Each structure stands twice: as C-alpha cells, then as structure tokens.
Image (cartoon, helix red, strand yellow):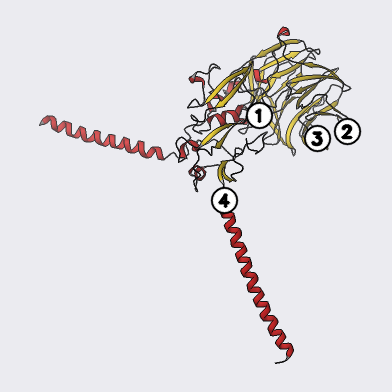
Amino acid sequence: MSKDEKNKDLSRRDFLQKGFRLTAALSLGGLGIFLAKDASSEDGLWQIDPSKCVQCGRCATHCVVTPSAVKCLHVFDMCGYCDLCGGYFRPEAKQLHTGAENQLCPTGAIKRNFVEDPFFQYEIIDELCIGCGKCVAGCDAFGNGSLQLQVSHDICVNCNQCAIATNCPADAFERVPSSKKNISKGFSGGEDV
Amino acid sequence: MKGNKIIIPIAIVLLFAITGFMALDFFGAFDKPNENPYEYNLDTFKEVKQQDISHQEVQQIPVEIEALRAIAVDKDDYIYVSGNNKLIKYDKTGKLVLEVETSMEAFCMTISEKGKLYLGSRKEIQVYTLSLDLMDTWKIHAENAILTSVAVNKQNIFLADAANKIVYRYNLQGEFLNEIGRKDPNQGIDGFVIPSPYFDVAIGRDGELWAVNSGRHQLESYQDDGQLISSWKKSSMGVDGFSGCCNPSHIAILANASFVTSEKGIERIKITSPTGEFLSVVAPPKAFDLGTKGIDLAVDSEDRIIAIDPKRKQIRIFTKLEE
C-alpha cells in the first residue's frame, strides 16, 4: 500500500467519524428542541380568537366545568355605551328598561348602569355568565363588537384536549402562552385586557 | 274477567305508545347536534312583504378596491367609488372610465354642483377634478377626528366627525367656520350619539344640511349657522323604523326629497318620506350577506339608487319596479 493510499484511507475514516459525530449532535439537538417546545406547550392556555368565534353556543354546553369556563368579556374601550344595546336587549324588547322580559341574556348576567343621558355602561357578572355568546351575537350585529367570549383562566382546568375546542365549528380555540392570557379584537388589538 | 280483556290490550298499547314517545324524545335530542339553544335569531325581523318592495336590482359592478367605503355620482351620472388608496370612475353603464391612486384611506366622498370631487380620510380632505386630477389637499382643524361623511352645498363644506360626534362647517377654500350639532338644550339640540363609526350627512333639496343622529335613530336638519330646523326619529325592529345601537348608517336624498337609508345589523335599504314615514324597501336583508356594513348610498339624475356593498366588493344599482 502506497503512502497516498494510506492517507486516503485515513481521511475516509476521519470523514465517517466526523459524520457520525455530527449526526449524533444534530439528533441530540433536535431532541432537545422538541422536548423544550413540548414543555412550553404544556405551559400554554386555551383561549378563543374572537375574530373567528361564531357564537354557536357550544362554549356553554360542552365545557367540562359547570357553568362553563368561557365568559363574556367586555372590552370597554370599544363600547358605544348605547342606550339601545343589542347585547343587552332582546330584539323584540318593547321598552328599554331592566325588566327581565327585555333582557337578552338567559341568566341576567349583564348589569346595566346609567352614566349620563343617553349613555349606559354594561358590566358582566362572571358568576352568572354561562358563556352562551348570545350577547356577543347581539353586540356584533348592531354594535361595535365590544362583547367577546374569552376563556376565564381562573375557572378553566386547562384540559389537554379541551372539549369545547374539539367541538368548535369555527376553529376559534387556540393555545396561547400563559404570559398572554386574553385575545381581544378591536382597538386593543390582541393585547391583554 | 270481561273488563280485564279490554284493559290489558289498552294497557299494552299505552305502554308501547309511552315507550315509543320516550325513545323518540331521547334519540331525537341527539339527532340535532348542531342546534344552538342560545341562538340569536333575527330571521323574523328580516322578513319583508313583497308589496313593500319598490325596487329591483338591475346591475352589479365588481370593484377592485381594498376597503370599499365611499360612493358619489355626478350630474352626468358618472359613478365614483373609493376606499384604500384608489379612486375609480365608471360611466352609468358600469364601464370603467378612469382609475387613480390616492395615497389615502378614503372614508367618504361627495361631488359639488360645480363639479369638484371631495374625498375625505380620517383627518384630511383631497379635492379632485372630475377627471380625477388632484387640485388641493387640506387637513381639518380637529384633533383625533374620524371623518365619515362630507357634504357640499353652494357655499359650504360639511364634515361629519364620528370620533368627536360633531359636524364641522368649512368654506369652499377650506377655512373652518363653525360647529353644528353640539348639545344645547336651549336650542333644542340633543347632541349627536354616534356609538360606531357611521355618521352620515347629506344636502337636502333646499340646500339645508341633514345629519344622521344614528344613536337616537334620528335625522336632523340644520341651517348653515347650526340652528336646528327639524328632526324626525323612528326606533323599531320592524321595517318601518331603525333598530340596534345606531342606524341608519347612510342616507341619500331623492328628487322628491324622500330619504334613502341603509342599515347594518338588519341589512337593508329603505325609502322614507321627508318626514320619516316608511314608504318602501329598496333592498331587503336577503339581498345582502350576513354582517354587511357600510352600505354607502348615492342617487343619480334618474333616481336610480346606487349602493356600495363592501362585503361583496360591488357597486349595486337599483331601479324602481314598473307599476
């Protein structure tokens, strides 16, 4: 065997050794990234993208928690403080007062407070809200869309496979990092509110 | 014994009937997985009687503009539309005549009797010739304004600011003159209630200003100096009035001084008399896609009603039905 052939043999061996080392390093690195990503997703929370939500009513009926962990969130900076609020009054309401027969919410979970003529503030009573989204639909239809459904993380048990997300017809449920608990549409533009 | 012979078959039939009913009830409930027990249903309010419909849609013109928001018609019935960064001119048959870039997000547009086109963005007015050459640009004096409508009579330009809920009067050179519609109980002015960014103004047949007080479902007319002339309102979920937080969203005025109005929520175009009595429906809710908003209106010399449909990105033309 000539000297050149011996060098050639050695370089082939070197090449194979380096190749194995590189493959092993890449595999370990990839495994590390995968595990880190997996760990961070476990840290995520379920949330509803209001721009996708179609108010199908399933947040009220499919959550494993009773009443649902989904609640209506009022984004005040979008609200028109309307007297005739589409989210508060039933479409066929005869009078604009707080009588139960005029209210759209099936559980009376919206409190109407007079501010000044002709403005009223609407406040969600979380304990009564069942997350049905009826007020959200009314506000979307006639108002600015300031009423939005959001998962309340104080109540949500953060199931790996959320029962509502599985049944959501609009694919509006998504995982968000725990640092960003809410997604709101409108003026706040996805900021925490 | 004879009694038992009758009772037993009846009991068996009853048993089967009850079992059948229970089974139907039990399994029937599972047959409707998509039913929403909390559905917000406006279907009954969207029904329109055939005899109330006065117009038919005769043409749809597709428009390639992002965020189509404004329409106007000149005295020769050329149609102008605008939105983000574009201004387009069509002839009355819908044939494209001219198209220019505007470098502005237009919210409103009108054309004066003298043939100048006024295009408004949030805080700026651009003045064009009808050949779409830019003549002038001026900014309005108000802070944080959102201009949603512009109207021009012989001496004045009126600008509706939805953010500050007020109408500004400028002269034709762009100098601010006075405000219109600020709350003043002594003058009988309620003040504008504008919960959403739809605040329209138009010029009446006598040159007077008409402004939509949408939060009150009210139309108000003013003299140039801001004196209230008259107003009418009609709140109703029915076809005869306006519903929701804030309607009508847009108006136009026919040759006989009747109003053409467009609404959101229950999407429709209607005609009311000059004093607010419901006359007819131009386009019923079923003519629009659910959630259509911002149906700006214009009327041409033949009283054709020309609307923009931002959702479908179309100009839609309606003519009166034959008697």
Residue identifier under label 1: A77
Question: Relative to residue B294, is residue A96 drawn left or right?
Answer: left
Q: Are the residues at dot 3 and dot 2 in contact (C-beta closer than 8 Å)?
A: no
Is residue B6 something that shows in the picture? yes
Residue identifier under label 2: B133
Q: Name the chain under label 3.
A: B
Residue identifier under label 4: A41
Establish whether labels 1 and 4 are both on one chain. yes
The three-letter code of the residue at mark 4 reads Ser
What residue appears at the point 56 percent right and 54 percent down from the top-left corner?
Answer: A38
Crowd rating for badge 1 (residues with CA inside 10 Å; few <14, some 14–19, many 20+): few
The three-letter code of the residue at mark 2 reads Asp
Question: Relative to residue B226, is residue A24 drawn left or right?
Answer: left
Establish whether labels 4 and 2 are both on one chain. no
Q: What secondary structure is marked by label 4?
A: helix
- The tag earlier along the polypeptide, 1 or 4, is 4
Crowd rating for badge 2 (residues with CA inside 10 Å; few <14, some 14–19, many 20+): few
Cα separation, mark 1 vs mark 4, equals: 31 Å
Residue B5 drawn above or below residue A172: above
Residue B229: where, in percent of width, then height? 74, 10
